[in-house]
Each structure stands twice: as structure tokens, then as C-alpha cells.
Image (cartoon, rainbow, N blue to C red):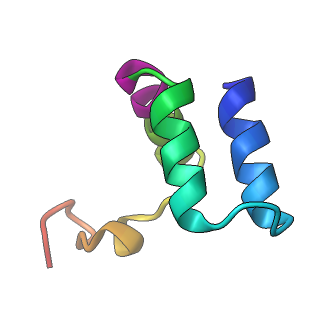
Amino acid sequence: MEEIKEILAAQYRGEINQEEAVRQLTVACTHEELAEFIVAAKNRGWISNFNLGLDEDGHQM
């Protein structure tokens, strides 16, 4: 999780662009680590159903 934080922080600061952040994440993290981060972000409300294109029942809009 620390590697994800460092890479996203570097992108936020403008030290790397989106493409470089994606490249670094694919090298530094396993699929499982990225999946855990995404699920945690969704559970914390950082990613909303609206952002995912889901209605209030969880179906695609």
C-alpha cells in the first residue's frame, strides 16, 4: 500500500504524469495489491457508485 501512496503522491505533485504513474503501478504492485486498494477506496467512499456508472441499486446506468 505504501508504494501505491508514493506513486500517486508523485503524480499529484506533478513529478510524473498519468501514463508514468500507471507504468510504475503495474511494475511495483501485484494485481492483488491494486485490487485491495480499489476495494478499500470504494468502501471508504473515495470511489462512488456514480463514478462507476451505477445507480442506487448497484446496476449499470
Residue 48 appears in which quarter of the rendering?
Answer: bottom left
Image quadrant where one finds the N terminus: top right
Q: Quadrant of residue 39?
A: top left
Q: Answer whether residue 11 is magenta in the image.
A: no
Closer to us: 53 or 32: 32
- Which residue is rendered at x = 39% and y = 20% of the image? 32
Identity of the residue drawn at 82% across and 62% down: 15
Q: Left or right: where does residue 23 sit relative to residue 4?
A: left
Task: Please tell me which residue lies in front, 8 or 27.
Answer: 27
Is any part of residue 11 visible from this angle?
Answer: yes
Q: How many marks?
A: 0
Question: As displayed, is residue 13 above or below residue 24?
Answer: below
Q: Quadrant of the C terminus?
A: bottom left
In this view, the residue farthest toward the left is 60
Name which quarter of the figure residue 57 lies in: bottom left
Q: Position of residue 60 (x, y in %)?
A: 13, 70
Q: Does the magenta portion include 34?
A: yes
Q: Give the residues in magenta.
A: 31-36
Question: 38 or 4: which is nearer to us?
Answer: 4
* Foreground of the two, 35 or 8: 8
Q: Position of residue 54 (x, y in %)?
A: 24, 69
Residue 45 seen in the current view: no
Residue 12 place in picture, x, y as percent: 78, 64
